[in-house]
Amino acid sequence: MRWPLLIPLLLGSPLWAADWDVPNRAGAINEILAQAADGDTLRLSPGVYSETLVLDRPVIIDGQGQATIDGQGVGSVITVTGPGVTVRGLTVIGSGSSHDGIDSGIQLVKTAHAPVIEGNVLLGNLYGIDIHGAEDSVVRGNRIEGRQDKRMNDRGNGVYVWNAPGARVEDNDIRYGRDGIFVNSSKKNTFTGNLFRDLRFAVHYMYADDSVVSDNVSIGNDLGYAVMFTTNVKITGNVSIDDREHGVMLNYANKSVISGNVVKGAKEKCTFLYNSNKNEFTDNWFEGCGIGIHFTAGSERNRIVGNAFVGNRTQVKYVSTKWVEWSEDGRGNYWSDFAAYDVDGNGVADAPYRPNDSMDHVLWTQPAAKLLLGSPAVQLVRWSQSAFPALLPGGVMDSNPLMRAPEPSAMKKVPHDG
């Protein structure tokens, strides 16, 4: 039996894969690519290579952490068109500036099945990595810094995913540019363990069902995690710190799970829902935002249980003429502004919590009424509602508010003093 030949075939790797040492001179990479066979590895010598590459068959390009490829401002620096390509250990600079061509540091096209892009540094390219139809792509452990020379909306994205089922973007450090990860018309993707800073959106998600956004950290971006026109997404264990607008935003996003996330210090809203229905919000921590959670445009039948609302200027903004219950099976949410009591010591307050009253509704629709907040008439209305809850207009009610704030494990990723 010919076992030595059969085993490599079963493993899907060539029998006689070779290693090539690429000298640092003009055109050397393309010269050796023309000689290399499927499965070969090109190990680049230290230095700068001023050329662009098209990788059309299974090869490994290894920069060993010391080689730089400079596209000199024309098109994409590396374009992967063949299956089974690995690119690692490179610094990639000098893409072109065309949004029409999606000029990128590394571009993965539809025929590039299962490429692996790992451990690279991509600096100053229009787009960092473009996963353009390449199924089962893996992009992990890269540092991507986008451009800073244009208005933010005119820059490219760190990682752009289009129609690339099975793509995994993991453990990357993405900074500057427009959006950290922009996803459009894709499905069954996983985005986990990434760090996003100084961007418009950390994750911008459109028409991308059945995917996972987990264990990422967004710091100081305009918006953390924006999920739009999408169904069945799991947004779990993420952190948003000091994002300028919202930590998590759902826009026409339905039947999704938002669990175990931490949002702190968003200037506008920790979480914003616009026409988003049948979502589950459980065990999240929303702290120090202008509004803890805001529902609008017909967002209904969302499950809100086990969350902590801590020190938000307005805990909830929800306008309704009927009551919506935010507890189930004797467990609700934690509210830092609720002067609760627990006589039986079961960890659940003995009175319900209603975050909004009729004066809140007036102030939302007539901001000028804030001038009257200190008036005796307003104080009388609020006292009357507290004494006679039947006068309240409807909205959110938590019949079983928690006495202690449950802390998600994602809090370990939040910087702490000392």
Image: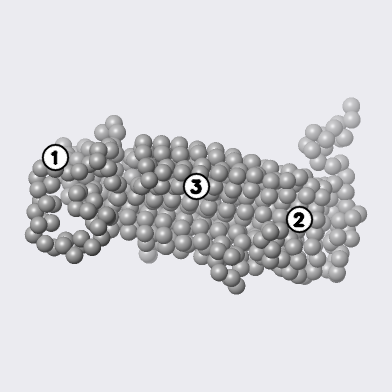
Residue at disc 3, secondary structure: strand
Nearer to the camera, 104 or 69: 104
Spatial CA span between label 3 and label 1: 37 Å
The vertical placement of 105 against 336, above or below, is below
Task: Tell me the residue at 27%/37% (across/down).
Answer: 325
The mark found on residue 68 in the picture is none
The structure residue drawn at horizontal position 27% and vertical position 43%, both measured from the top left corner, is: 320
Amino acid type for the residue under numbered disc 2: Thr
Which residue has dot 2 on it?
Answer: 79
Q: Is residue 297 left or right of residue 180?
A: left
Furthest-right residue in view?
35
Name the residue beneath numbered marker 3.
228
Give the CA distance from mark 1 to mark 2.
Answer: 66 Å
Q: Position of residue 234 (x, y in %)?
A: 49, 41
On the image, which quarter does residue 51 sit in? bottom right
Quadrant occupied by the C terminus:
bottom left
Most foreground residue, 139 or 95: 95
Q: Are marks 3 and 2 in contact (CB under 8 Å)?
A: no
Query: Would you name the residue on which mark 1 appears?
Result: 390
Relative to 90, is 326 on the left or the right? left
- Marks 1/2 in contact by CB < 8 Å: the verdict is no
